[in-house]
Amino acid sequence: MSAVDVLVVGGGPAGCVAAWEAAAAGAGRVLLIERDRAIGAPVRCAEGVGGAGLREFLDPEGAPWVSRRIRRMIIVSPDDTEVRLAERGIGFVLDRTRFEPELANRAARAGAAIRISTEAVGLERSDGPGGGRWRVRLRGPGGEETVTARVVIGADGVETMVGRWAGLETRVAARDMESCAQYVVGNIECDPDAIYLHFGPGVAPGGYAWVFPKSPGVANVGLGVVTLHGDGRTARQYLDDYVARRFPRGTVTGATVGGIICGTTVKRTVADGVLIAGDAAHMINPLSGGGIVNAMKAGRLAGRHAARAIREGDTSARNLQAYHDEWMKPLGASHLMYYKLKEALNKYDDDFFNRLARTVNRIPPDKRSMARVMATALVHHPSLLPIAAQLFAREFC
Amino acid sequence: MPLAVGERIAVVDSDVCDACGLCMPLCPPEAIHMTRRGLVVDAAACTGCEKCIAPCPVGALAMADVRG
């Protein structure tokens, strides 16, 4: 039976950065396992990421894992009215089949071992001198084996098995689950430097549809719906209807589906010798559904705190709690605010979004900053006031 | 409580399922498991609550009668 100090379960952005950070912080032997045959594939993601958050981890300039640089955001109302927001460097559309391997390579250079085609199938706690250990059963190409670990970082996505095994409450209410479907669509006409976000309950109830360019004429076209708010169609049926209407001559060359947990961070992200990070801990911006940068930030914290706890010789939940607190201070709290905003927006119908889009379009394009958009929207649509009040109360109180 | 014959449980159509795992955290008794052959519902643990059915992005889950 082999022994490691930190076992990271899951080779997505949270797990790769956790392994990278733990190894760099001197946690000792760090092993990252990924169930799939390739790190970064299959892609279950729209691949959009904000520039500022990304740059905290990797330099995107000229990087082979960037598909497109994004310069504009275009909000589309249910009746297809487009609102172009002021041009500025917004972010990037990634090629995640290359992005995650880059993160994994950084982890390996910092000293972590990486194993693909290997899954965790169960955890068992054993107490002993010098603190407890987890005995983790792994299944890989060579069969089953048991590995002991001082700290297990569960970065295993929406399934979040590590959290379950450790007794953490990670179940999701149906109203907080966005069911997503996405196609890679070619031969389409759209601004290759812009991301499109298409709102309205007729388009994507409880969520939105997106068009994220991969190259000129090719984009990830997808949507997320909360089926509780829908009319009985599945996410893929909503998408088929959307693509047929918006891109009738498009060519579908790829398809994916998945779930985005648009709630707030789980109440407990730590147990004795266990940290959970990223989607597994519901660390997703519930309004945008954005999870990549959040996952990397959580992975960085998890890796650091795992290394600290090992150094201190105390991997108890009580000593790991600082991870949870450090996440909640800036990020958990802002996600709570976005969650309230999302819940409030769910009350509006297509007609409201159409009128809002036309109001905002009266602002000259070069002055269409987020603050100006908000101010104008409030003057003409006072029913938005309670939402804004919630936002600002959260921000300043 | 184990289900009796005649009650209904969720079943996965493995030809349609994409193994995305979305249904797993929705299941109150945590009865849905990922296996090498895709997602499976533990018939003994399923309570027939139907919470997993509608959210499946591809409609791979459906209710079926418990067979004796």
Image: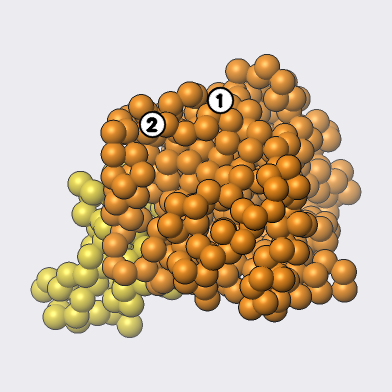
Chain colours: A orange, B yellow
Residue placed most toward the observer, A300 or A123: A300
- Is residue A251 at least partly visible in the picture? yes
C-alpha span from label 1 to label 2: 17 Å
Rendered residue at 31%/47% (across/down): A245
> Which numbered disc covers residue A305?
none
Q: Looking at the picture, how far across and down is residue A13, in whole percent?
A: 62, 38
Q: Secondary structure at mark 1?
A: strand
Q: Is residue A370 left or right of residue A353?
A: right
Q: Output the chain of dot 1.
A: A
- Is residue A178 at least partly visible in the picture? no
The residue furthest left is B68
Whether labels 1 and 2 share one chain: yes
Q: Output the chain of dot 2.
A: A
Residues packed near mark 2 inside 10 Å, few (<14), some (14 to 19) or many (20 plus)? some
> Which numbered disc covers residue A67?
1
Query: Does label 1 or label 2 sit earlier along the sequence?
Result: 1
Verify CB contact (< 8 Å) between mark 1 and mark 2: no
Q: Which residue, given by chain and number where applicable, does mark 2 sit on?
A: A188
Residue type for callout 1: Ser
Q: Secondary structure at mark 2?
A: loop
In this picture, is A200 found above or below B5? above
Quadrant where the C terminus of chain A is found in the figure: bottom right
Residues packed near mark 1 inside 10 Å, few (<14), some (14 to 19) or many (20 plus)? some
Rendered residue at 68%/45% (across/down): A365
Q: Is residue A332 left or right of residue B32?
A: right
Q: Is residue A321 left or right of residue A335?
A: right
Q: Looking at the picture, how far across and down is residue B61, in whole percent?
A: 26, 61
Rendered residue at 28%/45% (across/down): A244
